[in-house]
Amino acid sequence: MERKRTRSALKHCPFPGHALAAVLAVGLSGFTTWGGPGLSELKELSLESLASLRVDTVVGAAKHEQKLRDAPANVTVLTREEVQLHGWRTLGEALRSVPGLVVTHDRSYSFLGVRGFNRPGDYSGRTLITVNGHRLNDAMFDSTSVDRDFILDIDLIERIEVIRGPGSTLYGNNAFFGIVNVVTRRGATMGGAEVSGSYGTFDTYTGRLSYGTRLTNGVEFLFSGSVYGSDGNPRLSFPEFSHLDNGIARNMDDGWSRSALGQVSWKALTLEVGYVDRFKRVPTLAYTLPESPIIFNDRRFRIYDDRAFASLKLEHTFEDDWKLMARVYYDYYRYDGYYPSDYEPDVEGNPSTVNFDLDRSQSFGGEIQVSREIYDKHLLTLGAEARYDFDLTLINRDLAPAATYLNTQQDGYFAGLFLQDEFRILPELTLTAGLRYDYYAVGGETLNPRAALIYRPWDPGTWKLLYGEAYRAPNASENYYDWPTPPSSLGLEPETVRSYEIIYEHELGRTWRASAAVFRNELKNLITDSEDGFANMETATAQGVELGLTAFYESGIQGRASYTFADAYDDSDSSRLANSPEHLGKLNIAVPIWRKKVFASAELQIMSRRKTLGGPPVNGLCLLNTTLFSRELLPGLDASVSVYNLLDTRYSDPASMEFVQRSLRQDGRQLRCKLTWRF
């Protein structure tokens, strides 16, 4: 019998274009009525007012802190305050508010797409996610976890840096379409204990206990533990299975997760340890095959994910202004899947069994980076990085009667060298250029350059002309899941992208920022799953326009608006890519309704229809989320009430090829109440 292809193979508002323009126009016109002083009025501000000004900075774009206008990339920064005001429950919900980003869900995992590229079920390995600069993409699937399997409770996030565009020059593998760098809170800023809990629709609850402080001897620490549980949607209808239990999956959507974070810092050293484990029951009958169909509505169908990391980092500035960063780390990931299956009658033994999938990766590695400013014109950064994946285990077997279809233990490694120079040609003109060489165990070598010319012809305006190349190496699942056949899997080449982008950013007074970008991404050697295994089969192009506007006022009023047009197509036949919305509009507004203690916020997301794999397209959607948030109504107490999908919009996300369904229905209106107490 052929071995099962399981998780490793997978792992209402119709949209009118003029409606999107109208919504954004109304939102932006609303912003303009709020007014605000211009640059000429800065000299009249008090010291207190100057201290309260919001100045966004980013670390991940060039591996050192810099203002957004100086970053050699298209960057969005989300703050902890925005997380609170909008009631975001997961990292994925926060990323949905970012221009050009799309997060879809298949009721097991959430997937992150960027600027028209979000292939159903590919684990989002073309975006690199880091926590305080430490890579989180696992060595098995390259997956980016942005749902309840993310390693941090969202309340522990200080800010989220979203850096669009290729980043392999500094980060190597997976920094294909961009980097999401999550910066955590510190013990000193927490300044004591926090207890937080929430309850909402589907009997969903969360709980968190955190403590952080800085001691008089300079030691700073933070420890936090979180739990999550949900009964999920009790009744999910799948018309494709109407002949099985009337197509109704009952009580098959529950799940839970537990996470912990520890940080200890002393002088130049920082030790971080993180852990998350997650359970999810699967209602969708995913991963089924004709010769071994999974049993519908069977509560044995479940999956588990475990992730952990430990990182020890040294940061030091020498007397001659050389800056050093060195890090050693360990990463762990494990996936367990249980698939109740009915085999064909001609299979010997009991025709009903549970197929078990185990995928585990363990890695350790290190990186070192030195930088220095030379002649007041050059900021040089030189670095090296190496990672050894000493445990890449893939097992697939039936539990009873026992039968093993896959059992392989492999290893792998990556090594890279990079150099970057930020050259201030003139006070208003800067050239950032970099080059990185990488070598990896299965496949060979790759060289990735980037260049960014930044020109500020006048103080409020900035032009950015960007070019970059990036790669994604074949991961362990793609190389070994069909081991020992087909042997051609080991001949996979890395996916590559060439990216071109022109950006204009303009600061309108001290509270507004507007941006406009034109981009083009050319993708080659895309790795695709086929009947003969994984192969480099596709080339594609994604190009378009992105507009953005943000406003932050001393009064507490703040908002973001964006529109993205993305034309993403297969080069072979010019057909549109699946799960690729052509139009994407977003609007976020938060307004204080009583002093700066009670806020009301609204988040509107509009998306055009999307193509599915072999089925009819899913309709466009309009989603409206609202939150009422109060801060310090009682000493140390924050409270919020959020309604998600307020309009109860009926919408679906495209499914991957391993699903019988071509699209998967998403949840309707949901409610959550949350309390946080600091003491």
Image (cartoon, rainbow, N blue to C red):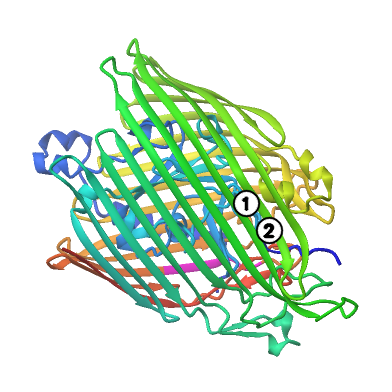
Image quarter (top left, top right, bottom left or bottom right) of the C terminus? bottom left
Quadrant of the drawing holding the N terminus: bottom right
Q: How far across and down, in percent of the image, does residue 439 sit?
A: 64, 29
Relative vertical location of residue 672 with respect to residue 45 in this rendering, above or below: below
Which residue: 76% across, 44% down?
A: 538
Tag count: 2
620 and 291: which is toward the camera: 291
Q: Is residue 341 or residue 201 the one in the foreground?
A: 341
Answer left or right for 529 relative to 388: right
Q: Residue at x 72, y 62 (%)?
A: 396
Which residue lies under the disc numbered 2? 8
Q: Position of residue 486 (x, y in %)?
A: 84, 49
| Residue at x 41% of width, y 21% of height | 430
**Helix, strand or loop for disc 2:** helix
Whether pointer 2 and pointer 1 mark residues with C-beta atoms closer than 8 Å, the reply is yes
Residue 36: horizontal and vertical position, in percent? Answer: 22, 47
Q: Is residue 60 left or right of residue 521?
A: left
* One can see residue 589 in this view: no
Q: Amino acid at mark 2?
A: Ser
Q: Which image quadrant for residue 40? A: top left
- Dot 1: few (<14), some (14–19), or many (≥20) neighbours within 10 Å? many
Q: Residue at x 79, y 69 (%)?
A: 289
**Could you say where residue 262 lies in the image, as x and y percent from the top left?**
33, 52
Circle on res. 141: 1
Which stretch did the figure color magenta? 618-624
Q: CA distance from mark 2 to mark 1?
A: 8 Å
Tell me the element at label 1. loop
Q: Which of marks 1 and 2 precedes in the sequence?
A: 2
Asked whether 313 falls inside the magenta stretch, the response is no
